[in-house]
Amino acid sequence: MDLNLRLPLAMLVLVGLLVYTTPTHANSEISIRRTYIVRVRPPPNFSPDMSSSNLETWYRSFLPPSSMSASRPHTPFIYTYREAILGFAVNLTKVEVEYITKRDGVLNVYEDYLIPLLTTHTPDFLGLRSNGGAWNSIGMGEGSIIGLLDTGIDMSHPSFHDDGMKPPPAKWRGSCDFGDAKCNKKLIGGRSFSRGHVPPVDNAGHGTHTASTAAGQFVEGASVLGNGNGTAAGMAPHAHLAMYRVCSEFGCWNSDIVAGLDAAISDGVDILSISLGGRSRPFHRQLMATGTFSAMRKGIFVSCSAGNSGPSSGTLSNEEPWVLTVGASTMDRQMKAIVKLGDGRSFVGESAYQPSNLVSFPLAYTLDSGNVKGKVVACDLDGSGSSGIRIGKTVQEAGGAGMIVFGKQVSGHNTFAEPHVLPASYVNPIDAAVIREYAKNSSSKPTASIVYEGTSLGTTPAPVVAFFSSRGPSTASPGVLKPDIIGPGVNVIAAWPFKVGPPRTSANSMKFNSISGTSMSAPHLSGIAAIIKSVHPDWSPAAIKSAIMTTAYTVDGNKKPILDEKFSPAGHFSIGAGHVNPSRAINPGLIYDTDEEQYVLYLCGLGYTDSEVETVTHQKDACRKGRKITEAELNYPSIAVNAKLGKLVVNRTVTNVGEASSTYTVDIAMPKGVTASISPNKLEFTKAKEVKTFVVSLSWDANEIKHAEGSFTWLFGKQAVRSPIVIF
């Protein structure tokens, strides 16, 4: 979700629960009906072409007789599922849940819950330019279909025009449920699964922003209030879009998400972009993990936000290895708003609203300091999650002339460019501490100016990990390195359904907004995956993920290690394999492919029961024969291993997707104290799609080494296929 919406949503979740539960007897908790999702085994005669009525009859057989009373002869299913999971959503009492749970054929019963929602310059920053850039050689996603689970879309926005677009592929089976409005060759489908039976129109902004980030068309003269001006475009401007509205501004009900996944799989999307996520749970307790597994089985690539709960460790969402888990980073653009104090010191902040300069206004620290009329008010971002925009409205109502927003201590050197409602500047907490001291303790009357310098490109260091980007290790599966990748997620400019900025700002038919979050980074990777899928339509989701990860870079524009928000070198639990590099990902040389059976054995290796594995994979008795693999044995493009083990020996298998005749040699980079070898240390290929297996051996003193990071890289000509290693 947008960083500015993240924390207030937690409060709204409680409101949603109060509204959503429907008691039949106000004083009897046991008779309150709530929504549950029931996961069942298939009927004995099940086949993919079984009619919906026959499948519904099977689902109805699990319901208790009490649900078929005279007053309720036909218990209405909220949803029936067949693609993402086999099961249904229905309102039940606790007694009815207990009855259903005991029925043969029922794998699990989940109470429904609310899940939070978690550009003009980013194509250039990523090397995607139509004039001499990578788009010329790698294409723009032609023929690929990106489905988004989000808040809907503003289909009238110019980012979704279809000039130069080809018709959707013949496999497309989706529908366009916008009422009288018609879809086009860009926006080829839209369906709504949020309560109220409303069309998939965006009333929050989030879905419009993510859709245009992934695959928005070229729009010249795009800006936020005149800043960040340029030609807007998504990562895959010629890919098709389908919107599945499963969220509102309050969040996303789990049952709606599964319904959206069900529809997207059935409709024939190639890529799923999911910018939402809740707290970590075992995969068999996450219906979204089951739904994304079903998508992977159908060859659909899934890109998910890593979460906005950083910088603390172990805070990830969407950890399953069959999806791409995407963290967020900055880019080399600033919308500068310089704060100058009366004593001559100055500090670089940011604002997407840049009116006339404020010169030498009285400075007040907080709204509680008395009369603030005509003053610049310095405000701390409080723990409730209020954004600078919301605080600015309060300052404006109190008569303040301007505002300095103090970043939270955990945000480090990150700054954010918001479309404020009054003259403002967001400064990082390091600079905020100096300004705060001056405002509180100046012997003379403190003053401040805000000087606007417009948009600067090429700022350094960049990229830097965003403070809010969730960090590993994974809680659900620590032995798989997550996040997988980072991409732009700070101050991302993309389409927006509403006017932003001060109320008096003139209306602009082309509305754009600058927001931040891993919700913004995930659709960047969705669009890049669509480009890869367009060039390599036969590649599996794992192959596409491997191409993205093994070609990522780990140094910034100054050729120094990518930094975190504190300007310390960022570890792989922050950046995954590194920062996405689209132009190289199209031609990775070698890929690490993984099939469905490996994932099943991996889940068995996590210690899941047969029933728990079946819940995720739809395969019965998968672990009964004792077959399983450890997390490290999964043919993943990275390696993570517990330091207590002291050693690791695992196989990895690569497929040649580069030059038919090629010889790769390995380069190993591990810190002192870790012994590493790879056998063989040379891979000779004579044909395309040839497969080779090698052994990675690591050893270290478990009493001495508690954390170590390194990598191994297969090299051939310009090809560099890098895999990170983390011992933790």
Image: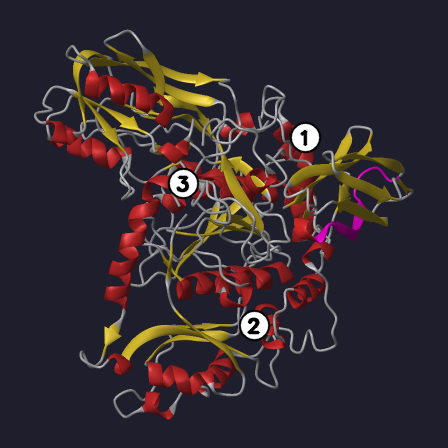
Q: Measuring from the top left, give residue 136's x and y in whole percent.
A: 64, 28
Disc 3 from disc 1: Cα separation: 27 Å
Quarter of the figure with residue 359: top left
Residue 163 vertical placement versus 113 (above, below): above
In front: label 3 or label 1: 3
10 Å neighbourhood of mark 3: few (<14), some, or many (≥20)? many
Q: Earlier in the sequence, mark 3 or mark 1?
A: 1
| Residue under the image location 40 percent in, 40 percent down | 209
In front: label 2 or label 3: 2
Residue 615 vertical placement versus 172 (above, below): below
Q: Is residue 653 magenta?
A: yes
Quarter of the figure with residue 526: top right
Residue 543 vertical placement versus 449 (above, below): below
In front: label 2 or label 1: 2
* Residue with the mark numbered 1: 137
| Residue under the image location 69 percent in, 74 percent down | 623
10 Å neighbourhood of mark 1: few (<14), some, or many (≥20)? few
| Residue under the image location 27 percent in, 53 percent down | 11
In the image, farthest residue toward the left: 371
* Residue with the mark numbered 3: 209
- Viewer-closest of 533 and 452: 452
Q: Earlier in the sequence, mark 2 or mark 3?
A: 3
**Region rendered in magenta:** 645-660
Q: Label 1 is placed on what type of residue?
A: Ser
* Residue with the mark numbered 2: 615
Disc 2 from disc 1: Cα separation: 43 Å
Quarter of the figure with residue 726: top right
| Residue under the image location 65 percent in, 77 percent down | 620
Element marked by disc 1: helix
